[in-house]
Image (tube, rainbow, N blue to C red):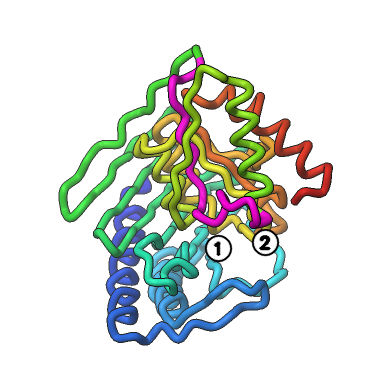
Amino acid sequence: MGLEFELQIAEEVARKSGATIVELIENNQLNPERKHDKSFVTAADKAADVIISTVLKEKFPQDLIVSEESWPPGQEMYPESRRVWFIDPIDGTGRMVEGSSDFSVMIGLALPGPSGLLPALGLLYQPRGDICWKAVIEPSGPIVAERVERGTSFKLDPLPAINSPPAEVRVIASPAHFNSDSKEGKVVLPLLEKLRHASPACNVTAVKRGSVGLKAMAVTDAVAELFFSPLKNLALWDLCAPHVLLRAVGADLYSLDGVPIRYDGPSVAAPSGGIMASSPSTRELALNVVAPAAKELKEAGVY
């Protein structure tokens, strides 16, 4: 597949944009404002987008660049056999504005294949902590899968797959999603109860963290086995990079009701019912317990 150069460039621009983000935070120059969907955007989001998009357009002029901060709202995507970069300059902007370190730069690359665009390269960089997850995969398996923390590289090994239900299932979601008064909590908490009822011998616990990408990386790093997000405003730039990293260790990403994620367009929106990530050990629980329960909640109008 030969994506070593692409991965090198992605890491360089992610680290450069990460340094700019931290500088703007420390100088109190974020200048947050609300977008059309009520989510935050800051000077750091815009600066990171310019850094990443400019370099990718220069290095790979034939590729399509789909970035959260520069893709026109509502515009459809027609790759026409081109490679597509999906960029989230800052995943977790709201948490960053609150002062949390739970935010990351996400860069993903999808390649045209026989059945549509296939996520092939994924990189997440967490500026606070200097942690970079990166992977390149091809149909035969991962050819790069590593986590680099403060200059020290660790290989991302495949997660274990077991036939019987695991003794413990750690479910990670945003802190607010475990609140019964939130609209997301009205989805996440019933799904937790479904898991407990389906596997009474299994200890189901909650792990709280911000950023879609960093929650997915908790599954990659074996800190959690399942990740739920019932958010409806997600887009493909939220999913491509973490999807590659999840697949590199044998995990996967689905819509919350169990449908595979597709990157072909024409919409850049993610599945309207939210998403979930599952480790190999909880794949059966995810698809046979969580997905049907989420579909019932969606059909009942809960979300």
Determine which quarter of the picture holds residue 78: bottom right
**What span is in magenta?**
165-183
Q: Is-magenta flag for residue 171?
A: yes
Disc 2 on helix, strand or loop? loop
Residue nearer the viewer, 234 or 34: 34
Residue nearer the viewer, 11 or 235: 235
Q: Is residue 87 left or right of residue 191?
A: left
Judge whether 118 appears above or below 284 on screen.
Answer: below
- Can residue 115 be seen? no
Name the residue located 33 percent from the left edge and 81 percent from the top edge.
Answer: 24
Asked if marks 1 and 2 touch (Cβ < 8 Å), the reply is yes
Determine which quarter of the picture holds residue 233: bottom right
- Name the residue carrying label 1: 64
- Name the residue carrying label 2: 77
Name the residue located 44 percent from the left edge and 44 percent from the top edge.
Answer: 207
In the rendered structure, which amino acid carries the disc numbered 2?
A: Met
In the rendered structure, which amino acid carries the disc numbered 1?
A: Leu
Disc 1 on helix, strand or loop? strand
Residue lying at the far top of the rendered structure: 163
Name the residue located 31 percent from the left edge and 59 percent from the top edge.
Answer: 11
Judge whether 281 appears above or below 243 on screen.
Answer: above
Q: Is residue 55 left or right of residue 87?
A: left
